[in-house]
Amino acid sequence: MAEYYTSTQAEQEEKEQLKQLVGFMLGGELFGVDILMVQEIIRSAEITKVPNAPDFVEGVINLRGNIIPVIDLRRRLNMEAAKQTTPSINKNWILILTIDKRTTGFIVDLVTEVIKIDENDVEPPPDIIVSGLENQYITGVCDTGQHLLILLNFNRILLMEEIRKLKEIDVADK
Amino acid sequence: MDMIQDDELRQLFRIESEEHLQKLEQHLLQLESQGTNQELLAKLQREAHSLKGSARMLGIVDIETVTHAMEDVFKALSNAELILTPEWVDRLEEGLDTLQKMAHEAITGTPARISAQEAIAKLAFEASEEQLIPKTVAAIPDSNTSESAPAITMQATETNKLEESQSDTTQADKTQIDKSQQIDVIRVEPKKLDVLLTRVGELTVTKTHIESWLTQMEGLIASWEEVVRTVKKTQGNEELSEQITRIGNTLYPLRQAAFEDSTALNRITDGLESDIRALRLLPLDRVFQLFPRTVRDLARTLSKQIQLNIQGGDTTADKQLIEMLKDPLMHLLRNAIYHGIETPEERQNLGKPAKGNIQLQAKRTAAHILIQVKDDGRGLDEEAIKQKALEHKLCTQEELSLMSRQRLFSLIFNQGFSTAQMVTDISGRGVGLDVVRSSVEQLKGTISVNSIYQQGCTFQISLPLTLATTRILFIRVAERHYAIPVEFVRMVRYIALNTVFLVQDRETISLDGQAISVAWLDDLLELPKKRLQDEKVEKQPYLLLEMNEERLGIFVDEILEELEVVLKPTGPLLSRVRNVSGITILGSGEICVVLNPLDLMRSAQKHAHSTISRTKLPLQDSIGNKSKPKKVVLLAEDSITTRTQEKRILEGAGYDVITAVDGLAAFNTLATCSVDAIVSDIEMPRMDGLTLASKVRKNKDYEHLPVILISSLAKARDRKRGMDAGANAYIPKSAFNQQTLLDTLRRLV
């Protein structure tokens, strides 16, 4: 009995360090974003293009009377473009996140499930670059057993300075 | 002295002190022009007294003592213990300045570094014999002071009059106190009114939406009537027929009710909207009253004699408009004083009165507020403008000869023209009119100028009455919907495409005998081309945009309707997108991008080079565009953020950019790379921008290389230094924006 008791206590402790993430796929990789940042997940909203906007801005959507910009996360992260062979491009998932009190939509390939991870299992980003993704946007990685889960730093993805710097790096690479 | 700690008290004191200080200033200026006037002195005393009271209550000792000293001076003036001389007016003005700085410190916490003792010492007076001149002797001001200062008339007040007005004052004081016991005014933060107005704006949009239900209901009833007729013809099911009739019994009253309610809603919304708008209205005097002092001070420093006449200060306008009008108006006035009005000697030689006249006039028409700044100074020199325009390649000799006077004058609002004024000031207008124009444009207004050489110059600003909602034309192009604000749409017409002709490779149409450039909206927006060209199309709709004498026809696929919309906030990500002025949600829930007519006109100018008769050679256009070599810009700037930002702007405009971290690096780069222009900061380590510019100029190879300096130093002297060093243009950071840089660059390269 005593043994049982201690094990539940340990479980309890472990639970306190559990983090809930919304998992999503992008370019064959599994990513995770803190569930507390996710306002909602929508499918096939009508995206209105904004002419002459930055290229990673896919457009804007009407979310209950508010205008929300939608970012093509692939393009923002400089990952290879989605294969155009899939005609169901409109059937993409849009993750609506609240970042710094601002609501922004991000297009991803597929939203999978809620993933629970132990914060202790999160490791600093590896030096290798996943799918051409600069690791400045990665908070950490976590081995879930089946997949390597990548945790993204959305605050940084939206920082205007970052967006500007991105351009700079692009040019420097050329 | 410290900042007032309590938030609420600080807010209250801010509002209150501003009001008192403004009134003090206003009355003091009146006092200066009218001379000793008991009524004014009483008012001044009262204002000083109230300010003193609230300062004491909040324990701001410095303000208390200085106002006290001022109050004493006013008292002495009204008791004739002291005589109003220009010198005293100056001292009081100085005291007022001190108070303003102290109040600022109390509100913001920024140390004013001002000694109250010093201010009080300046306001101290002794009832010396000299000043105790008997009232019967007319006081003649010292001839030295009267020359340098605008004349101050002295009124010898009669004793009876004086007593009379004094007793009046005490009575007025009493009623003032009684009144102050009851609250008859509630102060509301303007921000709260803004929120209200936005809400009402949305209500208006919803109202329009509800109105459209009526039409739908009419349709429903029509189809119901159809059903009734069919059922009656078949004469079959009686029960069904009865049921259908019953539906009709509810349908008609429903339509009636909807109609009545919609009308009522319409009335209420409109009323509410105009009421709230009225709440936000303030008299233009709120800004106008800042000007007499500026004009007076400036005229005095320049030894000019200037009379400022203000008319129509009671014209009301939206608070936001008033706030944003201050700077452009101030700029126009300063220009008039600096460059318009001549010195008294010059004026007399020209047979004009020595005293120059500036008129600031406001009036309201049905849809606009008109503001005029008129001076009787030098006026604009047409020849000088022409010469400048040629020098700076703004237009060709041929274009100039065809230009109307009005059009010629409007050139001075050009960015290029303003920078052209750096060295000399021949045309009698200073720099920065482009800034004035862009501020006015931000308010969705227009500005124009007219002038007669040697007789004066008139600027006229025309502004819309409100900024909260925008009237738009809803249009369709390339299977998408867009909105264009109606302010700049002069007219909407149809034209047969086969009448479009080419003038210098630009598509042009003829309208009432005038040639007007045209562009396709989908080209300007860089949309994928879906349009099928058919030269036989008889009726291609186009909008004629007009702004400051510039006209552009824009072809669209279809013009749908005119609507009133509220622009929605879009967040920083989309805060400044070319050709876009905002985004709105229509009654149907559809998102609609509202285009920016000013940007469209600029885009059209850029496009002019690349669109070579697309109707005939649709393919060559894009090829020709790509094969054109990009111009190379060398960018020297030591701050990484600024460098990145500028680089991005330049690249966005299609330039290739080479960056350098300072002047020396830039200069070394020149040897290895061929560049078309240099854009440089001034303050940089190792080698600054001025040295860079002069080194570039001294080298034979780069003699003609355009150099643009960008700097936080905005004074005329700094510009001069930049010019002396050999720069072609000088853009102060304060006035820096994307468009300024790109326009300047395009002009030079």
Image: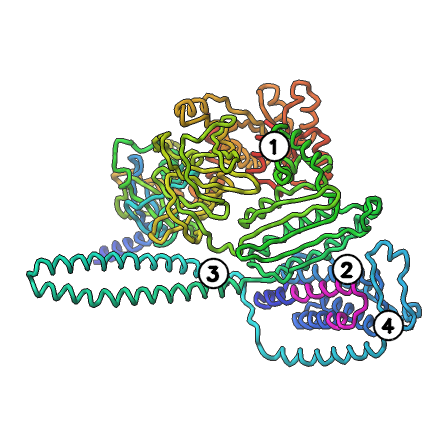
Lower position in the chain sequence, tag 2 or tag 4: 4
Identify the main secondary structure in magenta: helix
Instruction: Identify the residue under disc 1.
Output: B402
Whether residue B53 sits left or right of residue B275 in the image: it is right
Q: Marks 1 and 3, how far apart in space?
A: 47 Å
Residue at the spot 43% in from the left edge and 39% down from the top edge: B542
**Residue A102 falls within the magenta-colored stretch:** no
Q: Marks 2 and 1, how far apart in space?
A: 53 Å
Figure check: B109 above or below A109: below
Figure check: B222 above or below B177: above
Residue B658 seen in the figure: yes
Instruction: Identify the residue under disc 2.
Output: B94
Q: Position of residue B737 (x, y in %)?
A: 57, 40
Task: Using the image, tell me which numbered label, if any, was put on residue B197.
Answer: 3
Q: What range is drawn magenta here?
A: B17-43
Count neighbours of disc 4 (C-alpha within 10 A) and say few if under 14, some if 14 to 19, many if 20 or more. many
- Do circles 2 and 1 both sit on a common chain? yes
Q: Is disc 3 placed on a helix, strand or loop?
A: helix
What amino acid does circle 4 point to?
Glu
- Do circles 2 and 3 both sit on a common chain? yes
